[in-house]
Image (spheres, rainbow, N blue to C red):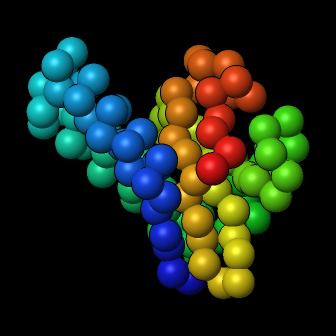
Amino acid sequence: MRVRVSKTARRDLDAIFDYWARRASPDIAGQLIYSIKDRFQVLADSPEIGREARETAPGIRVFPAGKYLIYYRKVHGVLHIQQILHGARDQARAFRKD
């Protein structure tokens, strides 16, 4: 299955990288981004493994990647990565419905 990463999710990944590059190191930030992106293929292979995120938006599923949560939906054979949020955030408030 093909994977499409939204602009919002790409901005999320950039922000996660920037935060951890400043807080720890660019190498650690890069490893974290790689581990999150590695989950994209897992989701493409088995899109039903995430739980439904009804409280966030209809048709959206969520799957953990360490302390982060990947929000996605499957549409016509394409896995759309919608957003990536830290698990400690108020998910319903932070989720962007674009």
Residue ID at (21%, 15%): 23
Residue 4: % across, % down: 49, 70
| Count of numbered circles on the image | 0
9 relative to 47 in the view: left or right: left
Q: Is residue 50 above or below residue 54?
A: below
Looking at this view, is 50 or 94 the one in front?
94
Q: Is residue 38 above or below residue 12?
A: below
| Quarter occupied by residue 89 | top right
Quarter holding the N terminus?
bottom right
Residue 35 visible in the displayed image: no
Residue ID at (68%, 45%): 97
90 relative to 87 in the view: left or right: right
Q: Is residue 15 above or below residue 53?
A: above
Residue 88: % across, % down: 59, 18
Residue ID at (60%, 71%): 79
Residue ID at (51%, 81%): 2
Residue 68 visible in the displayed image: yes
Q: Furthest residue to the left?
A: 26
Residue 43: % across, % down: 59, 64
